Amino acid sequence: MAFAELGQAANEFLFDSEEGLRYLRALLKFHTIAGHTLYSTAYYGPNKPMAQGGKQGKPSLPTDDKEDKNKNPAVLKSEEDKRKPSFPRGHKIWDLPSLVGETLAIEVFRYGSIIAMRVGDALEFPAINHLTEEGVLHPTEKIFLPAELRISEGGRQITVEEFKASLERYL
């Protein structure tokens, strides 16, 4: 469903051609963050090594406490951020680097047991954590694209030429 927003021509290019597979890999790297593990309920940064017995260091939890932001180097946004919702508790923002070097803004909203997660302009509710051997996977119904390729609701489909030009630097 997520790839449908790219349009038929871009999908045929990505999935039905050898050249397109290179661009598909680049697109997937745009969605992948290494060295950071972010669950909807906890964050383990790159500086929290695994302890003996396989347990990682103490996580950073999405709470609304007045905690020291310097303890978690991935939290880059301020509390005055205009995007902050009016949820009475549980909002954190992380700016984390993707495998292609772009930064993905990731927000976790928590109100009791209700948890939502937003990456860029894609809000996923409820936030789902699929544990993998190497970390955690968050399913989404939206493709994260470089800024010049962003598609507005009901907007036109991306041409293969635009898609290639935008992702060329990530190959």
Image: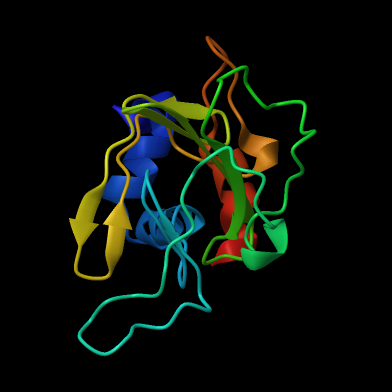
- Which residue corresponds to the image point at 58% horizontal and 24% vertical from the top-left? 151
Q: Quick check: 167 above or below 120? A: below
Residue 124 place in picture, x, y as percent = 39, 28
Q: Quadrant of the N terminus?
A: top left
Q: Quick check: 120 above or below 16? A: above
Q: Nearer the viewer, residue 152 or 157?
A: 152
State which quadrant residue 20 falls in.
bottom left
Q: Would you say 21 lies left or right of 89 here?
A: left
Residue 32 place in picture, x, y as percent = 44, 59
- Which residue corresponds to the image point at 40% horizontal and 60% vertical from the top-left? 19
Q: Nearer the viewer, residue 76 or 60?
A: 60
- Which residue corresponds to the image point at 37% horizontal and 30% vertical from the top-left? 115
Farthest residue to the front: give it: 66
Q: Would you say 59 lies left or right of 71 here?
A: left
Residue 89 place in picture, x, y as percent = 53, 28
Q: Nearer the viewer, residue 77 or 34?
A: 77
Residue 121 place in picture, x, y as percent = 56, 29
Q: Would you say 79 lies left or right of 31 here?
A: right
Farthest residue to the top: give it: 154
